[in-house]
Each structure stands twice: as C-alpha cells, then as structure tokens.
Amino acid sequence: MSLVLQPFVGGQERWLNCCESFHDLSLIQTWEYAQAKAIAGNWQTERLMFEEGGEVVGLAQVMLRRPPLLRQGLAWINRGPLWRRSDAERWERLLAMAVMLKNYWVIERGFYLRLALPVAAENFPAEDFFRQGFGSTRDPGWVSMRLHLTGETQKLRQSLDQKWRNCLNKSERQGIEWSIGPDQESFGVFLAEYERMLSQKGFLTTMSPEFFKIWRSLQQPGKEFLAAVGRHQGAVAGAVLLARYGNTVEYLAGAFNEIGRRLNAGHFLIWRSIEWLKTHGVLCFDLGGADPERTPPGIFHFKAGVKGQPYRLAPELESYAGLISKVVRWRVNRARSAGAAGAGI
C-alpha cells in the first residue's frame, strides 16, 4: 500500500461527491458543517485527501484553532479520516492514514492533534495506535443510536418501547396536524420554538439558532435541513430539525411548548418523520447522540424509546510534541474538564 497525503483540490460539490462514497461519513465531515463552524466561531478549516494509484481513498476535514499571535494550535479531526468504502477494509490503512496526519500536523507543523476516529469502539486496536506515538485523551468516543429503516413499518412500530408507543398512541388521538419539508417557513417555525425553549430554560449550546441559520445558508439544493412542525387547533405545538447526508438522516434538535408536551407532540413528530423518511428512500435514522452517562436523562430515555441500535465510537486519541503543542493540549483539556462544550470542539 502506497498512500499519498495532500491538500484536497476542489470545492463543495466535489467534496460532497467524494465523501458520500464512504460508509463512515458523518455530519461532522460534511463541507457545510465545517464552513458553518468557521463562520460562527474562531475556527479555520483545512481539507486533506489520501490518494493511492491516483484514486482518492480517504478524506479528512480538519478544524483548526490557534491562540492569538501563534501559527500553531489545535488540529481537531472529528469522525475522520473517512477511510472505509467496504467492510473488507483493513485496519492497517486507517493506521497509516493516522500516522501521516500525525507527521503532517505534529512533526512538521507543531500542532496539537486530536483524533476522534470514525470506527466502532468494539475491537478497536488501540495498542497499534499507541505504538505509533498516539496517546489516549481519556475522553470516550461518540455514542448514539441508529434505527435502520429497511424493515416493515409495522414491525418498526412494534419494536418501539412500550411506554414510548403508549405516548405515541395518545398523541395520535389529539388531532395534531403536521408537516415536514426543507422550506424556509418550516425552518423558521423551528427556529422560533427553539429560541423560545433555550431562553426559557437558560440552555447554553454550541448548536445555537445563529449556527443553524449559517449552516442552512450553506446547504446545497436537495440537502437542506428537514423541519417537521406539529400544530394543534392552528397553534404551533413544537418542531424538530433533521439533517441529511448520504443515505442517513440525523436528529439535531427538538423544541416543544407547553401544548406540545401535554400532547406528546415529540413522539408524534418523530414517528411521523420516520414514516416519511422510510417512504422517501432514507435507509438510516440516527438519534443524534444518546450517551447513558452524558446525555440528560429525559432526552436519553426519549431517544432510547425509539429502540435504535446503540453504537459507540473509539475513544479519542492525541499526539503532540514541543512546548506550544503541550500548552495547547493543556488548554483544551482544561476546557473539556470545565464542561465548556469541549472548547467548542
């Protein structure tokens, strides 16, 4: 195997065409997400590709953050590099890619490199990476659930948690009207409910209304957010926001007012969305984060009730060398420990 690491050549459309051929694609590695992060916060983006025999065999979207007046800083690769086009891919290829990234960012450029690889924690050969100079950050990998939409709709409904299904049954007797679409009006309804919820509950989140606005403005036609809106007797009861990539749709956020909570509008909109997605050829519905230890209990139990298949990605890795990268590492870890949304990463 002879891999070559070089800057990605091309724009948004080419990145989309390349990355959608990888099985391990996630929202974090989409062009629009990274651009929105760069616009909304103090981030820069670099995109790299791995070639073998003239063919693109891997992609890595890197988020960069530098302290003032310094050329070095944090190089954060979240759920990258993309490397798997089939289940037959061998670990050695991913390991070779990781070593190339370490040499490029740490050895050549003096950055602190942090890697959250897009691979399952189960059977992850961590020792192979440690032998190549990577260390453990002691931060666990991403945890969520996926509901595969290839089965019969009735069987999917029967597989719902009994209490969740009872809430759904109740909601269906309440006369809730609903709609789903990528249109600006539906998105605006979601934003209004979301802003109201954040204000009332005093939530602080990197997934702010402004960030969602920027993100949506960068999306290509046919790839926009889907907003599902529920109404009762003409009044908005709540809304949920869904994101599309590859053959997957991911739940981003939901916002429900007092009427919506009383009517179990959350259960209603999620299930109606699942039905709609299935009929429109979507193969997988990702619950967008469901960690029994980190997700707020109410949100976790709501998502768990859908009975998707849980998955956990490998723990995060790191590499650093030199005083500056050690200082950057200390600042990142301190922000993580303080619960400051991982310094926005």
Image (cartoon, rainbow, N blue to C red):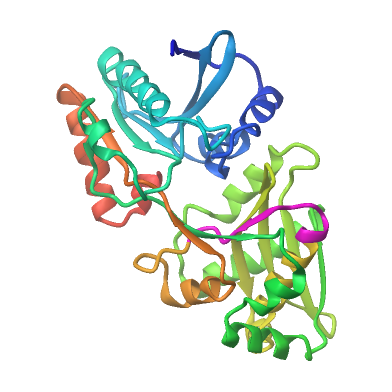
Q: Is residue 186 visible?
A: no
Compared with 5, 264 (above or below) is below
Q: In which quarter of the view is residue 296 placed?
A: bottom left
| 82 horizontally vs 136: left or right | right
Residue under the point 65% across and 84% down: 165
Most foreground residue, 64 or 313: 313
Most foreground residue, 182 or 244: 244
**Residue 278 within the magenta-colored segment of the rendering:** yes
Residue 73 placement (x, y as % from top left): 31, 27
Q: In which quarter of the view is residue 102 placed?
A: top left
Count of residue discs: 0
Residue 233 placement (x, y as % from top left): 84, 85
* Quarter of the figure that contains the C terminus: top left
The region drawn magenta spans 277-289
Residue under the point 41% across and 28% down: 94
Residue 287 placement (x, y as % from top left): 57, 61
| 51 horizontally vs 114: left or right | right
**Residue 48 within the magenta-colored segment of the rendering:** no
Residue 220 placement (x, y as % from top left): 75, 36
Q: Is residue 271 visible?
A: yes
Residue under the point 43% across and 30% down: 90
